[in-house]
Structure formats: C-alpha cells, structure tokens
Amino acid sequence: MSTALLILGIILVFLVLGLRIAQEYERAIVFRLGRFTGVRGPGLYWIIPFIERQQTIDMRTKTVDLEQQETITKDSVTIKVNAVLWFRVIHPADAVIKVANFNQAVYQLSVTALRNIIGQHQLDEVLKSREQINRTLQQIVDQATEPWGVKIEMVEIKDVEIPGSMQRAMAREAEAIREKRARLIKAEAELEASQKLTQGAKQMESSPIALELRRMQMLSEIGIDNNTTTVVLVPSDFTNAARSFTQMVNQQQTAS
C-alpha cells in the first residue's frame, strides 16, 4: 500500500510539474529534446517535465522608438531623424526558430532602412512627403521581417532636425516667396485699377459735363482740409470764350 501511494504521489507531482498557463496574448513554443513540437496556448496546457521545454512569445503590438539617426539626404544636407515603429508577432514559431532575437533584429533592420530611404530623398521631399516615406519604409521593413513571422503595422517619422544654417536659408526663401506674392497682388491691383480708370476716362471723354462734374467733385474733396492750397485749372474752352468776348468788346469800343 505504501509503495502504491508513493508511486501515485510521484505521478501526481510529475503531472503538476508539467502544467503551464498562457495568457490570452501569449503563445508557448514547445521543444521536445531540442525538436520543435508545436505551439501551445492560450489557457492551460501540459508539457512533459524534464523532456520538453517552452519559450513564451508575447503576441501584442509593440512600440519601439528608433533612436535619432544622423544621415545625409540626396541633396547633401545632413539631418537628424528619429521614428517610431509598431510591430507584432503573427507566427510565433518562426519568430523563435528563424531568428535569434526578433526584437533586436527588427530594430536594427528598421534603423538601417530609415537611413537608406532618407538618403534617397531630397530635403524638401523629407519635409513635405513624410507620409509617403512612412509607407515606403513600412513596406521595406515588413517585407524583410515577413520570414521571421513579424508584421510591421506602422512606421512614423517623429522628428526631423535640420542644421541652423539651413533653417535660416529656408526662412529667407519663405520670406522671398511671400514678398513675391505680395508684389504680384499689388501689380494685379494696379493693373485692374488702371483698366477701370481707362474705362472711366473714355466715358468722360464722350460727355464733357461729366468731366466738369468730376472736376468739381475733386475740388470739393481737396477743400476739406483747410490747410490745403488749391490750384484750379480753368478749362481751355472757358479761356477761349473769355478771350473772344474781350476781343469783341474791344472792337465795339474802337468802332464807337
């Protein structure tokens, strides 16, 4: 009886030692005497004690900050770039068997790809086409990590640091563009005003009364300021009429 109880106790201990629990987001890669036997979990499962061993893989999405990289753009400008990477394991067996440390491998591959893709673009493209660069970088890294059972969900360039001299040059360029735009707007306004003035002059040319009314209106506007000295130009028609009247009066006086 004592022997049977001892054997039963050993069996129970053996069974308890093999019990394992994996969380919902975890998977266990089981090896039996060094050979891969399968993926276990989530939940309760059992492995053979002392014969089988396991390695647990977290299946959740991981966020990795890619440290700031100093690289040269296609137009030979030295900039510093850092990015953020989101990835997760979709095939845990491949992530353990086909690569020694998938976390480190994904990180190093992403950093190298970031430097390479920045070197293929000019500075203006890096600043303006960041979304396109993010998509291209994601495709490159995802394609390389696919054999490792890793899915790259998203890559985002977080910050681009450019030299101070280049910042000042870009500020001068932006200022020149704004000044050019202001001058163009002013020139367009002057052109439109000249066209309107030409149309008004042509209209007044056909109506002398309108011209005189405009002259009187101008005099009234000038006379608003008491400190203004106004010089009135008499139309040539009035001058000719006055000269003719004076000559007629002189002739009448001479005849009498």
Image: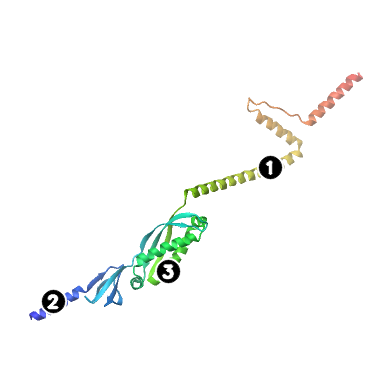
Reading the image, the residue beneath label 1 is: 194
Residue 158 sits above or below residue 151 on the image: above
Q: Is residue 154 visible?
A: no
Residue type at mark 3? Answer: Ala
Image coordinates of residue 54 in percent, x first then y, are: 27, 72
Image coordinates of residue 1 in percent, x first then y, are: 7, 81
Which residue reaches farthest right?
Answer: 255
Image coordinates of residue 238 in percent, x first then y, are: 79, 29
Query: Quarter of the image containing the C terminus?
Result: top right
Q: Earlier in the sequence, mark 2 or mark 1?
A: 2
Residue 81 sits above or below residue 3 on the image: above
| Left or right: residue 129 compared with residue 227 | left
| Left or right: residue 119 compared with residue 228 | left
Secondary structure, mark 2, is helix
The image quadrant that residue 45 belongs to is bottom left
Q: Residue 144 carries which label?
A: 3
Which residue reaches farthest top?
Answer: 256
Q: How crowded is mark 3: few (under 14 residues within 10 Å), some or many (20 or more)?
A: some
| x 37%, y 66%: residue | 105
Circle nearer the viewer, 1 or 3: 3
Residue type at mark 2? Answer: Gly
Circle nearer the viewer, 2 or 1: 2
Image coordinates of residue 124 in percent, x first then y, are: 52, 55
Q: Can residue 194 be seen in this view?
A: yes
Residue 187 or 189: which is nearer the viewer?
A: 187
Q: Between marks 2 and 1, how big is the CA–CA gap?
A: 108 Å
Residue 35 or 224: which is nearer the viewer?
A: 35
Secondary structure, mark 1, is helix
Q: Residue 9 carries which label?
A: 2
Residue 21 or 31: which is nearer the viewer?
A: 31
| x 41%, y 63%: residue | 110
